[in-house]
Amino acid sequence: MRNDPASTATAVLARVGGPANVVSVTHCMTRLRLTLADPAAGDEEALRALPGVLGVVSGGDVWQIVLGPGVVDAVTAEVRTLLAGPAADGAAPGAPAARDTRAPGGDRAPEDLLRHLGAGPEAAAGQGTRTSAADRHRDATPVRTALRRVAHVFVPLIPALIGCGILAGLNGLLLNTGLLPALTPALSAIASAFMALIPVFVGYNTAKEFGGTPVLGGAVAAVVVYPGVAKVTAFGVHLTPGQGGVLGALAAAFLATRVEKWCRGRVPGALDVLLTPAVTVLVAGLVTLYGLMYVAGTVATAIGTAATWLLATTGALAGLLLGGLFLPLVMLGLHQALIPLHATLIEQQGYTALLPLLAMAGAGQVGAALAVYVRLRHDVPLRTTIRSALPAGLLGVGEPLIYGVSLPLGRPFLTACAGGAAGGAFIGFFAMLGTRVGATAIGPSGWALFPLLAGNRGPALLAAVYAGGLLTGYLVGFLATYATFRPAPTSTDTSTPPTAPTPAT
């Protein structure tokens, strides 16, 4: 089979139970995600064996096929063509009806782009073991499901965070240099507008995710940022517009969804269109003003204070732990819990000081992959995989290296964590010295994070510290892997190069 998008799409569909078994199809930067009506009909082992497939993650009814950046766009387009379903939701002709995602108010929520987040540890791609239906059911734990749903709320906002973050960095550079003074007010407005209204988007996505009417969730969350709340007194103090931020908006919209569902089951049909929205906004709005904003504001302040204290007093240790444990957290799906923390810190302080520490995990991954490349001189297929995945890894897209190199080999995954720990400790050490390196957006890492760097020092110093962390991660990841990883013994017949390294013990 030719390794081109059309043939890959055909082969993938054949191994997930055929087009009739596909309920919906979506993708992100590296993964094709198929929602299956009957997950037991898929053949995970056969999927892993396909040329061009870097890994497979199956969790419940959503299967993720890791293809890598660029490739996934082309393959997804071919899959949709083969399914020949409505472009809006990617449903296959003759497929079982997709789960009803219409809000009670009548709006149909689009299929979530990120239902893949939170896959279980059996996602160690390349091991070639087929996950049973019971295993997949066990992975759908309440905690993991809750984290995945929270991620569904925040992750769709990342493109806007990235775009506005880059513009904020550019505006800061222009202000510092005194260039284009007539343009900086406009750039400031463009870069800041989204952050000023981000609770509204959080509320909209929260209601959509939890089965409410999205616009009602956005309407209740808008209370958080409305300037008029300054006239409201709660717990003996005047509220501040934006108090509670994204956490308050998340809680407010979730409450609105519960109120709306309660009303739908009790209000007569003739009055539903009038009473349900009014009661939903009134009840959830009052609770938000006289409770949620104050509580969420207290929690958000505590998060910012704790993060600042942690880096100032135990920065090196905190960086070592965060950088070293991030890859396992990703594999367990627990990294989702950090998304609202990042958003809260960005909203409160203008940047998140946690992301550069976590980004060091990708640096360790790159160093480990380079060591494998040097060690396995005769393994042409694996070296080809590394060469194709390294550019993405340097730019912070680590999935091709994770699923194509380190996880299948075992020990390089652990040494990549060691590299991430060293890089995180490097940046954390400078935080203890008073230089906090942060990022104005969530998502990018590696070299792609440079335009988004921010902190309490000048841009040159922040870039130097971050670059030092990357180099430390590369170096330690490389040395640790080179020292501990050994290829399988080769035969004296060099005409057939070895392709199977010694697995980790």
Image: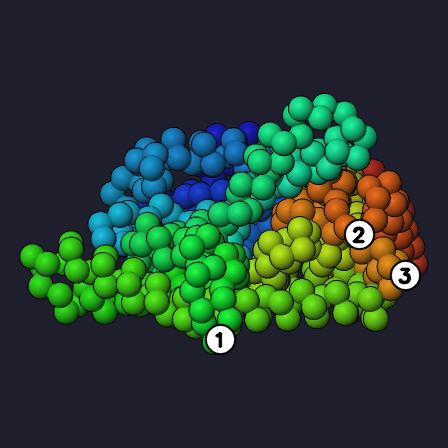
- Comparing labels 3 and 1, the label whose residue is closer to the camera: 1
| Circle 3/circle 2 CB separation < 8 Å | no
For label 3, count other residues whose C-alpha is less than 10 Å away and answer few (under 14), some (14-19) or many (20+).
Answer: few
Q: Is residue 186 left or right of residue 169?
A: left
**SS state under label 3:** loop
In space, the residues marked 3 and 2 are separated at their CA atoms by: 12 Å
The amino acid beneath tag 3 is: Leu
The amino acid beneath tag 2 is: Asn
Q: Which residue is mark 1?
A: 236
Would you identify the image quadrant in which residue 290 lies?
bottom left
Q: Is residue 426 left or right of residue 141?
A: right
Give the image location of residue 17, x and y in percent.
38, 49
**SS state under label 1:** loop
| Circle 3/circle 1 CB separation < 8 Å | no
Q: Which residue is mark 2?
A: 456
Total labels: the figure holds 3
Would you identify the image quadrant in which residue 122 lies?
bottom right
Q: Which residue is mark 3?
A: 433
- Comparing labels 3 and 2, the label whose residue is closer to the camera: 2
Q: Vertical placement of 277 versus 498: above or below?
A: below
Give the image location of residue 489, x and y in percent.
86, 55
**SS state under label 2:** loop
Give the number of the disc on residue 385.
none
Which of the pair 73/143 is nearer the observer? 143
Q: Residue at 76%, 57% (x, y): give it.
A: 357
Q: Is residue 44 left or right of residue 282?
A: right
For label 2, count other residues whose C-alpha is less than 10 Å away and answer few (under 14), some (14-19) or many (20+).
Answer: some
